[in-house]
Image: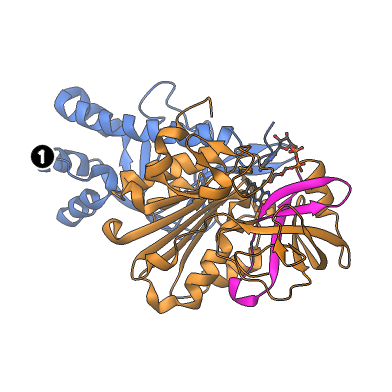
Amino acid sequence: METLERILGEQPFFAGLNPEFLRLATGCANNVRFAAGEFICKEDDPADRFYLVRHGHVALQLFAPGRGAMTFQTVGPGEMFGMSWIAPPYKWTYDARALELTRALAVDGLCLRDKCDHDHDLGYELMQRFLSRTIESLHATRLQLLDVYGAKV
Amino acid sequence: MAMSETASMGGVEDRTIPCVGRVSARRIESSDVVTLDVETPEGPVRYAPGQFNMLTAFGVGESAISISGDPASGRLTHTVRAVGPVSRALCNLRPGDAIGVRGPFGVGWPIGTAATRDLLFVAGGLGLAPLRPAIYAALAERSRYGKIAILYGARSPDSIIFRRELEGWRGRFDLHVEATVDHALDDWRGHVGVVTNLISQVEFDAEQATAFACGPEIMMRFVAQALVAREMRESDIHLSMERNMKCGYGQCGHCQFGPFFVCRDGPVFAYEAIRPLLALREI
Ligand SMILES: Cc1cc2nc3c(=O)[nH]c(=O)nc-3n(C[C@H](O)[C@H](O)[C@H](O)COP(=O)(O)OP(=O)(O)OC[C@H]3O[C@@H](n4cnc5c(N)ncnc54)[C@H](O)[C@@H]3O)c2cc1C
Ligand code: FES
């Protein structure tokens, strides 16, 4: 447990979190491993966790008939994915697939939500962190949407 | 053509007149990007990484195009993307065809003054072309620099330019090379996402690093902001700007950018000098 707490605390997402909150969060986390090509989640599955990647890379994909799986983001060491457990309808909105052997920490969203409901200070701290990740990814998505490498029109 | 020389008429340098060169080789980089090697009557060329030439497609017109080759080779190399009449005509040239060359013009990357420092090259799309001479120059004297990272963002895997070279650089132990694309199908094994995401994945000493970024202006703005967020100084971040050009040497005012002429004072500028201008819509 102690090692898991240390590993979790080393993840950028949890960096600087007060030790008591980190201990609470560790109670919801466990180490997971995925083989190359393995699906971690599929679109429309119930979303009950998020992942902090420690090793390897994960492709976030949408499948389009006739075009196949299209990757819109890859996630590597130190990065996280999975926000759908925070708000209804609690469903994954994409497929996540390990591109290579991937080690990650899976954090149980239901367990964490429960702890946040009981301790609003923990909830506020974590939601701030999730919000700042959401803003970062919104900025990146905007840049992707603008298709800046295309010809000027 | 020596660095400060261009075509000469009766011994008097006239920067308005192109010298007539010949295309000696043509390589297709992607569906709309072509690299041309050009031979000029003056023989081996000298230029500073980051400088550009005004290239003429005879009968069509002239465009500013950066030099994209190895400065040590003495060869003139340009990489052109077909976006309009002139660039399309340049892309359609074949070995043996005539091409007009005026230049080299402008202020290049301050690669020499970055000795002993960590170097970050951040390129987007065709922006790798103006950076490539600086990368060659740094690699030619690899031991003079600290860590070197090349971060490259492109629209899709098939729009990546200089692919073989990137792969070769990636295989070196003394370079950190990462490429990312905006979208990809399942067969792409690299990163997907914006180039700024890669900045968090490289190690460098922000106090002792110099960054060179080239690509669409909006991308360079985001890159500069991400580097500043990693505590780099604005004066250590250099961007290559593009504005419409006519004369190429500070006479006509076409390329005015606030108090600067991009052709004469740039195209490479320190972020510190141009940051306020990047936010203005009017220029
Ligand atoms: C210092 C400098 C260095 C440059 N280096 C290179 C280089 O190495 N390789 C290169 O291919 N180009 C480079 N350019 C841009 C190049 O000069 C223009 O793309 C070219 O002049 C366009 O001329 P055109 O007649 O083909 O198209 P235009 O008729 O001028 O434009 C046709 C269409 O293309 C769009 N367009 C124009 N320029 C660009 C652009 N840069 N990117 C995307 N869309 C554009 C226009 O908005 C228009 O919609 C450089 C420009 C500058 C100022
Ligand atoms: S192009 Fe004439 S002043 Fe710059």
> Which quadrant holds residue A103?
bottom left
Q: Is residue B250 above or below residue B102?
A: above
Q: Nearer the viewer, residue A137 or B11?
A: B11
Q: Is residue A100 above or below residue B39?
A: above
Q: Which residue is mark 1?
A: A20
Q: Position of residue B1 (x, y in %)?
A: 68, 69
Which quadrant is home to the C terminus of chain B?
A: top right
Mark 1 nearby-residue class (10 Å; few <14, some 14–19, many ≥20)? few
Q: Quadrant of ligand 1?
A: top right
Residue segment shown in magenta: B53-82
Q: Residue at x 37, y 44 (%)?
A: B272
Q: Position of residue B133 (x, y in %)?
A: 57, 65
Q: Amino acid at mark 1?
A: Glu
Dot 1: what SS? helix
Q: How many marks?
A: 1
| Residue B72 is inside the magenta segment | yes
Residue A112 visible in the picture = yes
Q: Colour of chain A?
A: blue
Q: Position of residue B276 (x, y in %)?
A: 40, 33
Q: Is residue B16 above or below residue A50?
A: below
